[in-house]
Image (spheres, helix red, strand yellow):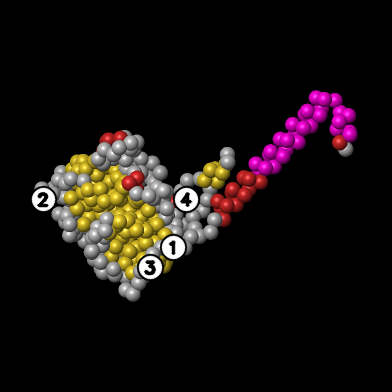
Amino acid sequence: MLQRVQALPKPVRIGLFVGVALAILLALVLVTLAVGVAIVQNSPRLVSVPLVAGYEVSEYMPLPDEDAFPAAIAVDANGTIYTGSYVSGAVWAITTNRVMVEIPNTREQIGSVTGLTVGPDGLLYVLDRISPLQAAGARVWTIAPDETLTLLHDFTGSRADILELPDDIALDGDGRIYISDRGINPNNNIIYRIAPDGTEGVWWQSPPVTNALSYAPTGLAYDAERSALYVTDSTLDILYKVPINPDGSAGENIVLYDRRQGNEPTPPGFDGVTVDDQGRVFLAALGTNRIGMYDPNTGLLTYIAGNFRGAADVVFSPLTQRLYVANWDQRSLLPTQVLFLAVETRPHLPFALDVITPTGS
């Protein structure tokens, strides 16, 4: 065989060599592509686990829809958990005995749930991104205990540029609404505030950070005991405490944690945030699928649980003394690039909320 090839004219031999090399290269590309697609499509479903002693982690409630994508979570004084779909706009209520209902008309009226909180008036406030993968303004809805859905504020049309990439919502003890905006425009890294009398405007803007190319105020949590707002930056991985002055203005920023000043090698991608009745601050680290606890007594951040399927938000329930985590599993919202091919992936169903329980409680 080799002698026959050697006897061929030189141009033919070169063409044959090039053809064989290309065939081998194509085969390697196809094998790599097949393996990559198989890995993307068949990655195992993660199971959350505790990372330190003193906590247990388990699945709390599976969600019914294949497009649930729970990006936000909230709890009321009765221990009822609320979560909503980033894709369909549906909002669910889950009682302490784990009875779940979909709140009527939310799927039909709300476009994309990105933030949830329960106000001092007992209403559930919903931050609606309208379109999940577009910067298209926002709406703020309220849901009353009798399930009445009301459009409270509308940032669409000529007002759509006020909030470019709204992410989370919080209320203080006086009923003032705070909305974080990760923004596209450099000047939109803000917290926007709406007072009960209708007065609104920028309340806070990310402070300048050395060598920072972008800012992204993301998670919000109000601390009534300390009259402060906790703010996460999902790009810089900073946790801020912003005091609320008696006149309602923003006090001087306090940096509680900055990843660049520690030894954390992988950006955690801070997202949702909550505070417990001891003043400990818990953060959802979406980038590493963990829940961190900042202890104000030590000034240290400790990761207490991990291996979540997209830890987008976390909430503390004073009634149950537990933490509840929204598993967003956002990997299937956009195609995964495998070489030159965009591969559609399915989420690990069912979507679910997890619960972190202190040992012995």
Give the quadrant of residue 85: bottom left
Give the number of the disc on residue 48. Answer: 1
- Look at the numbered disc 1 and give the secondary structure of its residue: loop
State how far apart marks 1 and 3 are (Cα).
Answer: 14 Å
Question: Which marked residue is nearer to the observer: mark 3 or mark 2?
Answer: 3
**Residue sitting nearer the eye, 183 or 228:** 228
**Residue sitting nearer the eye, 275 or 167:** 275
**Residue 129 seen in render:** no
- 159 is within the stretch colored magenta: no
Say what amino acid the circle numbered 4 marks.
Arg
The magenta-colored residue range is 3-30
State how far apart marks 4 and 3 are (Cα).
Answer: 30 Å
Q: Is residue 323 left or right of residue 251?
A: right
State how far apart marks 4 and 1 are (Cα).
Answer: 17 Å
- 8 is within the stretch colored magenta: yes
Residue under label 3, please give it: 53
